[in-house]
Amino acid sequence: MKRITVGLLGFGTVGQGTADILRQNCDVITQRTGVEIVVKKALVKCLSEVNPLPVGIEVVTDPSSLIDDPDIDIIVEVMGGYEPARTYSLLALQAGKHVVTANKACVAKHYRELLEAAQLHGVDYLFEASVAGGIPIIKALKESLAGNRIETVQGIINGTANYILTQMTQNSISFYEALAQAQQLGYAEADPTFDIEGIDAAHKIFILALLCWGVELNFDDLYTEGISSISPVDIELAQELGNTIKLLAIAEPEADGRIDIRVHPTMIPSTYPLAAVDGVFNAVYLEADALGPAMFYGRGAGKMPTGSAVVADIIDLARDMACGVAGKRIAPFSFATLRPAQIVPIDEIHSSFYVRFTVKDTVGVMREISRILADNDISVASAIQKGRSNDSTASVPFVVITHEASGLQINKSIREIENLGITTAPTVMIRVEE
Ligand code: NDP
Ligand code: HSE
């Protein structure tokens, strides 16, 4: 029987999940593929920190002992970060090895040179685990939906942020306690700023846009806003309004060839399917011209779900290698050629807005806010003042829900209102999608 050998760059949450699945499910994997797949080596930083040592896997600290090992067919990069992940992946591709990764940061930042190296050396570069953990969205876009034009994609694609928002909403757990739980459960990035500030979701939606439309965008133009400014009062008010706050990643092509692509907290009706996606679960909702609407749902992070996606790529490679077509069948980003495209600036995007001002509880404050909004041509759908104080120096939340307006109009109004000196804390603005 043909034997395919894997080397793991990194042996943390995802590396161990990958090794466990390949070992635990080796019978069914072999029955399905007709190939025996074994992990030969795993790279770690420090041998003494690997406890217990894995059975049957040689643990090493020298990357070249994996990358240059002629016995190893597939290198799995699950170290995370930009460097040395990029360098090791490039070295592996240049050595004629197929590379599988879960590292969306590295894919989003370095896809161009990784893609070129893979093509030049006739090997594959696969990254199913890089978006939405265990959900097979990349394969769906590359293969199952290859005959469709994709019209829109919206997703909850960061498990940590969704876990935090769910814990704050359903269990009144504090932001930092919920983040600590997500870290403990192995969901968060090594630097959790990537999760809570939306950067990880931005990497993922950037990868989805490449796959949906073959577009090369400037990552730095992608509007990214995280959940760190969302407070319990916003969650409570959203619920009163029949809404749920989710960190959404959204991408859609415009008629002029530009791409509307962004990541930000969004209030969505609680009846909307994405509102029911809780905890570490992710979902990608898309509309395709032939298929129509479709939603992909599952665990977006964690050892075994993410390992499942990595193993799926390894199995694809094993099957393709068995037929002699690995690296030849499908372009890494699904399109034979990619095209550069511009991102629509966030200020041009129209929606309703939830705007929470923290103001001194004095007469005339609401009138001033209403006046400035009207001056900026913003029509107010409703306004809520939360709590009442007898102390005119105390602060209260004053919330306005607007009708459709542009980001430019809202930001200008907020600046003008804050300049009046009536606010006592930064204003919170959340887009409302209806
Ligand atoms: P971990 O931190 O759990 O594991 C990373 C491992 O790589 C650690 O063991 C780390 O060693 C090792 N490592 C890092 N740098 C080096 C280096 N220079 N040399 C040798 N070893 C190194 O991360 P995860 O497994 O959670 O994540 C891995 C990748 O998978 C990341 O890109 C992440 O974004 C992605 N991912 C993670 C998911 C998850 O649910 N956790 C889901 C989807 C994708 P040490 O511990 O000593 O630092
Ligand atoms: N930190 C990421 C998340 C891991 O929480 O979604 C999965 O990509």
Image (spheres, grey):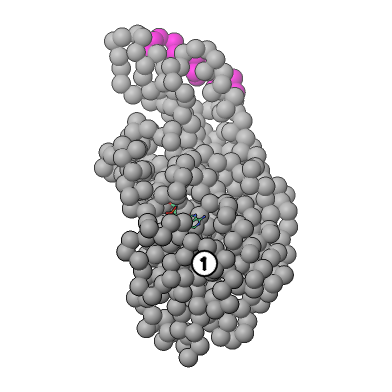
Of 191 and 112, nearer the camera is 191
Q: Is residue 385 magenta?
A: no
Q: Image height check: is 125 above or below 84?
A: below
Question: Looking at the magenta stretch, what is its main secondary structure?
Answer: helix
Residue 210 rendering spot, x and y as whole percentages = 63, 58
- Can residue 371 be found in the magenta stretch? yes
For residue 336, what is the image quadrant?
bottom right
Q: Mark 1 sits on what residue?
A: 76
Looking at the rendered structure, the secondary structure element under dot 1 is strand
Looking at this rendering, what residue extends furthest in the left direction? 171
Q: Position of residue 203 (x, y in %)?
A: 56, 51
- The answer to whether residue 82 is above or below residue 433 is below
Where does the magenta region start and end?
361-376
Q: Position of residue 77 (x, y in %)?
A: 52, 63
- What residue is drawn where x is 55% and y is 48%? 202
Q: Residue at x 67, y 47 (%)?
A: 218
> Taking 94 as reference, is 262 left or right?
left
Q: Quadrant of residue 14?
A: bottom left
The reply to whether residue 396 is visible in this rendering is yes
Q: Residue at x 61, y 30 (%)?
A: 408
Q: Is residue 50 above or below residue 364?
A: below
- Residue 252 location in percent, x, y? 60, 52
Q: Amino acid at mark 1?
A: Val
Vertical relation: 183 (above or below) 390: below
**For the residue carrying disc 1, how many other residues have a C-alpha within 10 Å: few (<14), some (14-19), or many (20+)?**
many
Could you tell me if residue 135 is visible in this image?
A: no
Which residue shows up at 41% across the image and 46% down it?
Answer: 161
Tag count: 1
